[in-house]
Amino acid sequence: MSEFDLIRRYFTRAAPGAVLGVGDDAALLRIGNGMELAVSTDMLVCGTHFLPDADPFLLGHKTLAVNLSDMAAMGAQPRWALLSLAMPEADEAWLRKFSDGFFALAEQHGVELIGGDTTRGPLNLCVTIMGEVPQGAALRRDGAQAGDEVWVSGMLGDAALALAHLQGQVALAADEFAACAAALHRPTPRVALGLALRGVAHSAIDISDGLLADLGHILECSKLGAEIRFDALPVSSALRPHLARPIGRHCALAGGDDYELCFTAPVERRDAVEDISRRMSLPLTCIGSIVAESGCAVRVADGSVINMGESGYDHFR
């Protein structure tokens, strides 16, 4: 099977939302009047982001999901994606399952694949995603204000806990591991939440590298600090027994791979945030507040501060 047969067979779909999609030297796009184009890219590398024996269907899902999460964090409606694949060989069974997983999630969110590239090499998956957001309405990292409440969606730390189980650092019961593995391998991008938070949240980010690391980007860009209540963190019944141990605190605060949203909103918009939570049947939890002083303090019930040796994942540390 040639490179072009591979593209035609597994990755060429109709793209009615584009002027021109897969099949030429470049795609052609036309965005709506009064809209801005949001663009992001993420790379997943075998051995770094996933194991060599990863289920290809779930890997196809996650490859797109991590990019959709970036659109969610910006409050952007995802529209188009480019997919670049490096593969050691053209394994048709693997490609079929991978593309099925990718396109199943793409169809859920109305995303059209409009191009990309393929080459032989170590397994490496890269998506560039594009979305639309009304001019001036994007959620950004630099918009937090002193006095804002800090919120997170969903549960924190399950994906990191599943990885810790696989690495032998903790031992989970079979049902606990199954639930946590779903968070690791099949994350749910919070696109609808990001859209709903436009005009409500002052700032937002997706939690890919760990709560403290990603909240830290908001604080750095907004030139502010935060006070976080450790006992307010939303965690699953699988993770809660481990919170007294360093590995549990790491999973909840610095583990990463959550792909939930962390956002800040003024106190007077609390009712609006809680209404969004009810309408979406999605837990949204206030975990602290933004303060004028720099730094991020995570406090336990007695007021003392947890001293974390690391704030999140960094590829070069």
Image (cartoon, rainbow, N blue to C red):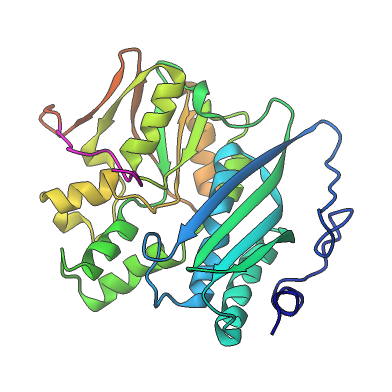
Residue 235 location (% of width, % of height):
29, 52
Above-or-below relation of 122 to 218: below
Residue depicted at 55% across the width and 82% down the height: 94
Front-most of 272 and 55?
55
Task: Give coordinates of residue 132: x percent, y percent.
Answer: 73, 41
The answer to whether residue 149 is magenta is: no
Q: Is residue 281 above or below residue 200?
A: below
Using the image as rendered, state which of residue 32 and residue 273 is in the foreground: 32
Instruction: Please state which of residues 265 and 102 is positioned toward the viewer in this rendering.
Output: 102
* Quadrant, the C terminus: top left
Residue 223 in the figure: left or right of residue 120 = left
Look at the image and tell me whether residue 295 can be seen. yes
Q: Which quadrant holds residue 200?
A: top right
Q: Residue at horizontal 49%, vertical 68%?
A: 123
Find residue 98 and report its image quarter: bottom right
- The one of 266 and 254 positioned closer to us in this rendering: 254
Residue 305 placement, left or right of 221: left
Name the residue at the right extreme. 19
- In the image, taking residue 210 as reference, residue 80 lies left or right, namely right
Q: Which residues are magenta?
A: 306-317
Position in image of residue 46 (x %, y %): 42, 66
Could you tell me what secondary structure mostly forms the magenta stretch? Answer: loop
Percent across and percent down for residue 275 are: 53, 40
